[in-house]
Image (tube, helix red, strand yellow):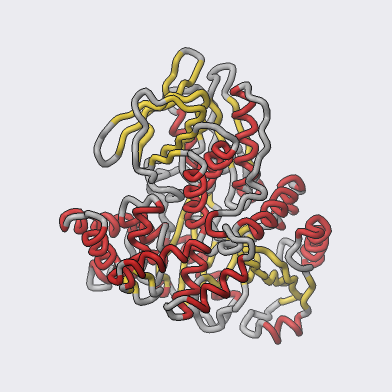
Amino acid sequence: MPHHHAGRDDVVDLAVIGAGINGLAVARDAAARGLRVVVVDRADVGAGTSSTSSRLIHGGLKYLERYDFTLVHESIRERHLLFRTAPHLVRDYPMLIPFYKGNSRPGALIRLGLVAFDAMAMTRGRGLSRGVSVRKVARRWPTLSRKGLRGAGLFHDAQVPWAERLCVELLLDAQRLGARVLTHTTVTGLIVEGDRISGLRAEDNRTGERTEIRAAVTVNAAGPWIDRILDGQVESRRLNGGTKGSHVIVDAFPGAPDTCIFFEAAADQRPIFVFPWQGRYVLGSTDITFEGDLDEVVASDAEIDYLLAETNRIFPDAGLTPADVLYSVAGVRPLPYTAGVSDNAKISRGHTVLNHEPAYSGLLTVIGGKLTTHRALAEDVTDEVLRVLGRRPRRCVTRERPFPGADTSDWKAFAQDFIRSSPLSGKQSRRLLTVYGVRARRVLELAAADPSLAEVVDQESGALAAEVVMAVREEGAVTLGDILLRRILVGLGADMGLSAAPTCADVAVRHLGWDEARARAEVAGYEAELRRYRPRALATSTSSGSDRRIS
């Protein structure tokens, strides 16, 4: 499992800094091509930017506006591959794009973009886009504002409701292929030997144990933190110019749509979404230049007010107020630094692999990247690693390789059979399938072997105690936050798992060797981790309810 240590004399082909989606994808690809790989992250897998995205697997429609045809092609291809290799996690996601009088992008231009996109997608599309008349919008989406409405386009994209699980499955597959992943382990410095980077030094956050990992190549895949990794050790221009994106999560509201609505904000012409997600709605996202502390990224009052106001404008019956916000999610996109840019939307969403030689041989930094194209980024990085190592090219296998949760010849048949034979309710069985894919069988095996693990630990989702045990024993979770927010996903429910946290900690005491002191500390640590989400449940539990907003 991730939380173990390389020996002091450890020598590997590749050390990867950062266990977000890109670092994990690099580890998986490199291990699949026969390299010895170690990944180090000071937190959990996917705990940074990867879990703060809009949860969309974009075909790349937005990038047409900047004529970034390479990125559009790449996005279409990668979306297509994810439908095949992770069908349990990635699903079709239609979105309506309404055109209003006064929009900065005329309806005719958007329709043209949809036609161009469909032509580029060809056989890899998810269905042809189509124009929707004002009359049809009124009939199919009757609660959408018709003030100034000129028509709409219906576009077929994709969503990954649980982006966290993409990261967990990359972790599992990388480990299956021989990579080692050290989570909750802070990189304290690079090993700089003249003009060569020979690996890294790290320290276990819990035990304080220090380790040195010597590597032929080191890849800095720390997302928005790439400059911090280099700072003071490697002379480099500024590489990351990430922008802050915030989302708010609300319950269904009056007039809430049953499909994603992708529209232009009146305040700043930015395209934003209102979309259904796990029985609730996500409103997002902002795109703000961010120069603050990367470890203190929190949605501001102004951002929350902006997203609510735009949603209320487009859905006149919504009447959303800050008191309706269950929690917010904010992160920093790992974009390339671009001086003097006036419109953040113009910053490239593509990725580049920077080789620091000749000044520092053996060091690569990954700039940019996004959920959709993580696999392609990893292929590019591994190609460069092999070149730097002087190894002959080896074929990348990740285009065909299924994610661990999709390791079956017929996913639909498996899903039907699982629901038919599962002893759980239909709702519980469907949830297990969407979280774990074919590995849902393992949850049932654990619960069958020990009936106490069939206990429900969270009433809202129906999650089982067996999942808590599997999260730690088989999926690399270390803390209660790892379990709730990034494995069993109970932490993304209405109260962010606050009611389930003590129960889950108790399961860890009974089955995972935690003592009572550890359990209390983990619950307190979990509440501290949640503060950046500003959860309504925490505000009401820590005060009389008058201080709604947690800073």
Answer left or right for 360 relative to 448.
Answer: right
Q: Is residue 271 above or below residue 23?
A: below
In the rendered image, the vertical position of residue 2 relative to residue 55, given as above or below: above
Q: Position of residue 257 (x, y in %)?
A: 59, 78
Picture quarter with the C terminus: bottom left
Left or right: residue 327 compared with residue 501: right
Image position, residue 320 (x, y; %): 47, 76
Q: Could you tell whether 90 is left or right of 496 in the image?
A: right
Please determine whether, in this image, residue 208 is positioned above or below residue 142: above
Q: Quick check: 450 left or right of 260? A: left
Residue 118 occupies quadrant:
bottom right
Q: Residue at point 77% right, 63% down?
A: 110
Q: Is residue 142 above or below residue 331?
A: below
Q: Identify which residue, 536 or 521, lies in the foreground.
A: 521
The outermost residue toward the front is 449
Q: Nearer the viewer, residue 415 or 73?
A: 415
What is the count of numbered marks? 0
Where in the figure is residue 451, as x and y percent of width and height? 30, 71
Query: Where residue 157 sits: x, y (%)?
Result: 68, 64
The residue shown at (42%, 50%) is 47
Q: Out of 542 and 195, give the one closest to the viewer.
A: 195
Q: Answer yes or no: is residue 499 visible.
A: no
Q: Residue furthest top?
A: 194
Q: Is residue 352 visible?
A: yes
| Quarter of the figure with residue 228 | top left
Seen at 36% across and 52% down, the residue is 477
Q: Residue at x 52, y 26 (%)?
A: 217
